Image (cartoon, coloured by chain):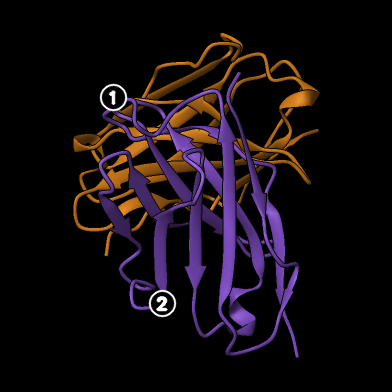
């Protein structure tokens, strides 16, 4: 089965750039999405097709995907960005696969 | 405006069958490219995709749970039903339904319901 690996936690200072990684075998050959989930809330799609932002998602959210690693980057991180972030990829053998999630802390 | 809402029992006993209904508005499954998925999240843990259905009644299942899962269209055209048999304590989770963004090759889930917490306990 296909697996996606994320670091359990990432810390960033307000105004700085946060990077959350997602690793998987030949992940760059697949499309990756990213979801933000705040405590007690449903996930929200923040990046799809590796780098596209849905309507209403701030420009400070960006994404990339190459080789075995996809990265969600948050520029000028704000306190409101503190949340869990999940990557997701679609694979023909396992359909939708989610990463284990990364807790982003804005210190 | 797209909305989805999950409904079903909050508590089920071990070995029972769980039946959840997703009622949605703002889109039609019969529109090309539309599909609805179920995803669950145990308390404090990661998301896990369960199943998907589209307007042509094509279905996909999480392979590790396939023998226990059934996804179907509901009695109303704006409903999708998920059943999970032989419930166990490890199935305790918040269950979400979500819409797949149409014609998106990344199969992203662009709208989510608020989720419903299902606890398995005798």
Task: Tell me what hue chain A is rendered in.
Answer: orange
Indicate whether B80 appears above or below B99.
Answer: below
**Which comes before the other along the chain, label 2 or label 1?**
2
| Residue at the spot of label 1 | B103
Depth check, front residue: B81 or A46? B81
Residue B75 shows in the view: yes
Residue A62, position in %: x, y?
Answer: 48, 18
What kind of element bears circle 1? loop
Q: Are marks 2 and 1 on the same chain?
A: yes
Q: Residue at x 51, y 38 (%)?
A: B78
Mark 1 closeness class: few <14, some 14–19, many ≥20 residues within 10 Å: few
Quadrant position of residue B107: top left
Residue B20, position in %: x, y?
Answer: 59, 60
What kind of element bears circle 2? loop
**Circles 2 and 1 in contact, beta carbons < 8 Å:** no
Which quadrant would the N terminus of chain A be assigned to in this image? Answer: bottom left
Depth check, front residue: A75 or B48? B48
Q: Residue at x 71, y 67 (%)?
A: B9
Residue A60, position in %: x, y?
Answer: 59, 12
Q: CA separation, marks 2 and 1?
A: 29 Å
Depth check, front residue: B112 or A33? B112
Indicate whether A77 appears above or below B88.
Answer: above
Q: Residue at x 26, y 29 (%)?
A: B105
The dot on residue B68 is 2
- Subunit under mark 2: B
Q: Residue at x 70, y 55 (%)?
A: B116
Residue B46 shows in the view: no
């Amino acid at each position: 089965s296909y697996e996606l690996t994320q670091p359990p936690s990432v810390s960033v200072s307000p105004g700085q750039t946060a990077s959350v990684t997602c690793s998987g075998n030949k992940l760059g050959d697949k499309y990756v999405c990213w979801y933000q989930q705040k405590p007690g809330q449903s996930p929200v799609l923040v990046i799809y097709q590796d780098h596209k932002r849905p309507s209403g998602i701030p420009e400070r959210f960006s994404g990339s995907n190459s080789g075995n690693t996809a990265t969600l980057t948050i520029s000028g991180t704000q306190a409101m960005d503190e949340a869990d972030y999940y990557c997701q990829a679609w694979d023909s053998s396992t359909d939708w696969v989610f990463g284990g999630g990364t807790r982003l802390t804005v210190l | 405006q797209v909305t989805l809402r999950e409904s079903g029992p909050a508590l089920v006993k071990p070995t029972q069958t769980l039946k959840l209904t997703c009622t949605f508005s703002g889109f039609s499954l019969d529109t090309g490219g539309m599909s609805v998925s179920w995803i669950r999240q145990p308390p404090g843990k990661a998301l896990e995709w369960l199943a998907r259905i589209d307007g042509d009644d094509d279905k996909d299942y999480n392979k590790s749970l396939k023998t226990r899962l059934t996804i179907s269209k509901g009695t109303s055209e704006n409903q999708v039903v998920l059943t999970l048999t032989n419930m166990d304590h490890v199935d305790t989770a918040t269950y979400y339904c979500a819409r797949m963004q149409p014609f998106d090759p990344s199969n992203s889930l662009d709208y989510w319901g608020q989720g419903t917490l299902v606890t398995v306990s005798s």
